[in-house]
């Protein structure tokens, strides 16, 4: 018979490695050649580079199986993974390159996600720890921190261009960032220290009303907590003004992004 197609090799090779101890590619080639009933003439067919074609086919198949997460790399005897055993339990009659490519993509996605989780988990834990400290400060200091962050976001001088309004009569606005001389260049913000519950739509709506009172078109609502889904939906529907919501994790992210952790004094 003629040499098998590539897709005709993947399944027999995986099956061979599963049930027999195979220590080398040459050994696998010899056993598969017998199974396929190949002649010496067929086994001596070569690719343009001079390598025997069937050897090249088996080598390529092994590479695809490794990439698909079905065979462990650099282990002898060649050893299949749990993923391969699950696949074999389905009794497939054939394993195609397309199938192996899909398995490879799935393996790569999971590996990338695992790597992200390994990086992200300590980051999130660090954010939680810092956020817990932030929640213990008083309201006045939190307003200062909010203004300091926005001064870095807009690259302005905090002492000159940020105004913290009087707590006795702030009209629902805790501070203003002055980007220019006219009213349109003012950015307003509201700061709310919250522990254990979300900022709902009513509070955000009140801030929106406060913006109307000063003809403001852009504002930030900053909290150590999070925002309810209704609050998020509310700001998305606004047409003539923009309110940006910054929750606790985004707040800590900005603090670290602008390297403010040394300027902000926490117990």
Image (cartoon, grey):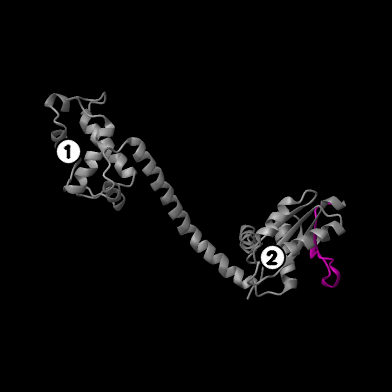
Screen quadrant of the C terminus: bottom right
Residue topped by disc 1: 26
In the displayed structure image, the side of residue 230 where residue 80 appears, left or right: left
Question: Which residue is found at the position 30% from the left and 44% from the top?
Answer: 66
The percent position of residue 205, horizontal first and vertical second, equals: 77, 60
Find out whether the residues at labels 2 and 1 contact each other: C-beta distance under 8 Å: no
Question: Which residue is found at the position 26% from the left and 39% from the top?
Answer: 93
Q: Which mark is residue 123?
A: none
Front: mark 2 or 1: 2
Number of other residues with Cα within 10 Å of mark 2, as a class: few under 14, some 14 to 19, many 20 or more:
many
Q: Residue 199 carries which label?
A: 2
61 versus 2 height, above or below: below
Question: Which residue is found at the position 59% from the left and 68% from the top?
Answer: 130
Label 1 residue SS: helix
The percent position of residue 250, horizontal first and vertical second, equals: 63, 59
Q: Is residue 216 visible?
A: yes
Number of other residues with Cα within 10 Å of mark 1, as a class: few under 14, some 14 to 19, many 20 or more:
few
Residue 166: quarter of image: bottom right
Q: Nearer the viewer, residue 84 or 78?
A: 84
């Amino acid at each position: 018979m003629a040499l098998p197609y590539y897709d005709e090799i993947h399944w027999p090779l995986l099956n061979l490695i599963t049930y027999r101890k195979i220590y080398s590619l040459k050994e696998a080639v010899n056993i598969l050649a017998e199974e396929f009933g190949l002649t010496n003439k067929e086994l001596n067919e070569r690719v343009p580079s001079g390598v025997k074609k069937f050897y090249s086919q088996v080598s390529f198949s092994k590479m695809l199986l490794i990439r698909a997460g079905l065979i462990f790399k650099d282990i002898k005897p060649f050893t299949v993974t749990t993923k391969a055993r699950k696949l074999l339990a389905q009794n497939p009659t054939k394993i195609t390159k397309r199938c192996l490519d899909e398995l490879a993509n799935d393996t790569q996605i999971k590996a990338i996600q695992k790597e992200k989780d390994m990086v992200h988990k300590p980051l999130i834990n660090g954010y939680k720890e810092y956020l817990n400290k932030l929640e213990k400060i008083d309201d006045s200091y939190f307003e200062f921190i909010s203004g300091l962050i926005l001064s870095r976001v807009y690259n302005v001088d905090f002492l000159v261009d940020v105004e913290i309004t009087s707590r006795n009569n702030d009209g629902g606005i805790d501070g203003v960032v002055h980007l220019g001389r006219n009213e349109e260049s003012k950015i307003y913000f509201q700061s709310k220290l919250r522990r254990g519950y979300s900022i709902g739509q009513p509070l955000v709506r009140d801030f929106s009303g406060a913006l109307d009172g000063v003809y403001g078109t852009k504002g930030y609502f900053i909290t150590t907590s999070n925002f309810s889904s209704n609050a998020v939906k509310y700001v998305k529907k606004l047409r003539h003004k923009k309110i940006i919501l910054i929750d606790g994790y985004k707040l800590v992210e900005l603090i670290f992004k602008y390297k403010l952790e040394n300027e902000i004094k926490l117990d």
